[in-house]
Image (cartoon, rainbow, N blue to C red):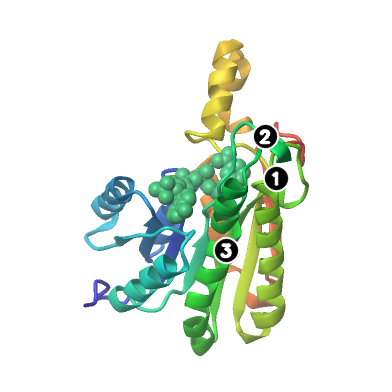
Amino acid sequence: MSLNGTKKPVIAVVGAGPGMGEAIARRFVAEGFAVALLARTEEKLQTMAQGIDKDYGKDTAQYYITDLRVEESVSSSFRKIRNELGPVNVLVYNAGARRVNGRSILDTTSEEFENFTKINLFGAFWSTKCVLPDMLAAGKGTILFTGATGALRGTPGLSSFSPGKFGLRSLCQVITREYQAQGIHAAHIIIDAPVDGKLIGGVRRRQWAREDAKEKLEDIDAHLLQPADLAHTYWFLHTQPRSAWTHELDARPMKEQMFSKL
Ligand SMILES: NC(=O)c1ccc[n+]([C@@H]2O[C@H](COP(=O)([O-])OP(=O)(O)OC[C@H]3O[C@@H](n4cnc5c(N)ncnc54)[C@H](OP(=O)(O)O)[C@@H]3O)[C@@H](O)[C@H]2O)c1
């Protein structure tokens, strides 16, 4: 059954949470897209989809409960998306998993390494395989991967995070080399800063509150990356003319040092 009667272009936001995932979804929806939101927690997905529909019209957002650690869960969600919304024009793989406080390799379990690497990397491979055939048939498609500083450097404590993000970066390069000439624009976005959300950004905000660092708290967008601001970059990448495609870029707020942490 089609839930996209007016045949809007379709974006799949894989790893759709209230931070960057929702901001990217809203940015594309504002430009006339229908959005498929994929994550595990139904309550959060429902609230997000209802909020987007309220602001942009009924049936603009659909959600698909997905566990990115399980290939069948990923492929089953993409099958439903294709049936209900049509072929995916833009894939944003935004999911990521890391410890807020790092842990040495000897203290990191194999289970955590496997779980996080599935979220950081395997899910992107499976999602890409799901959307590529339709994109290739259409002769165009955009694939955007959310990276992190951890994609560029291995930091002590993050053995269950960085290898997956390094891998995601290389997967994006492989997609480009294999499929760019057939119309696929793949780009890797290195988020080189804490995002102003519940987890990492929230830790920073609480730390600055304890330290009474008013100059930071009162000038927050110079210190924490704002999801809605970053969402413009994703839209910019999608709308680049094909004579000047960007494959990789990084983003950080004004007072964040380049590649200094995470
Ligand atoms: N936050 C930061 O400070 C920061 C810094 C640098 C880079 N990044 C990168 O930014 C991306 C996340 O952006 P965000 O922090 O703003 O998060 P977000 O968009 O608010 O949420 C991401 C969502 O991914 C979903 N997810 C996680 N594991 C999943 C799984 N196994 N299956 C399905 N969905 C899953 C989670 O929802 P469920 O739990 O409901 O599944 C989560 O809400 C990641 O790639 C991360 O590495 C973030």
Residue 24, given in percent of the width and then of the height, sits at 47, 54
Q: Earlier in the sequence, mark 3 or mark 2?
A: 2
- Label 2 Cα crowd, 10 Å radius (few <14 / some 14-19 / many 20+): some
Q: Do the residues labelled 1 and 3 touch (CB within 8 Å)?
A: no
Residue 195 lies, in percent from the top left, at 56, 38
Quadrant where the image shows the N terminus: bottom left
Give the left or right position of residue 114, taking residue 47 as reference: right
Residue identified by numbered label 3: 122
Q: How crowded is mark 1: few (under 14 residues within 10 Å), some or many (20 or more)?
A: many
| Disc 3 to disc 2: CB gap under 8 Å | no
Seen from the viewer's position, the closer of residues 246 and 106 is 106
- Residue type pointed to by label 3: Phe
Q: In which quarter of the image is residue 252?
A: top right
Mark 1 lies on a secondary structure that is: loop
Q: In this view, does 25 lie above or below 134?
A: above
Give the residue drawn at x 71%, y 52%.
151
State how far apart marks 1 and 3 are (Cα). 16 Å
Q: Residue placed at 29% from the left, 62% from the top?
A: 60
Q: Mark 1 points at which residue?
A: 159
Q: Which amino acid does label 2 sit on?
A: Arg
Q: In this view, does 25 lie above or below 261?
A: below
Q: In this view, does 189 lie above or below 239?
A: above
Q: Are marks 1 and 2 in contact (CB under 8 Å)?
A: yes
Question: Residue 65 versus residue 49: which sits nearer the camera?
Answer: 65
How many numbered discs?
3
Given the image, on which type of amino acid does mark 1 rest?
Answer: Ser
The span from disc 3 to disc 2 (Cα, nearest Å) is 22 Å
Coordinates of residue 100 in the picture (x, y in percent): 59, 34
| Residue with the mark numbered 2 | 103
Q: First in sequence, mark 1 or 3: give its number.
A: 3
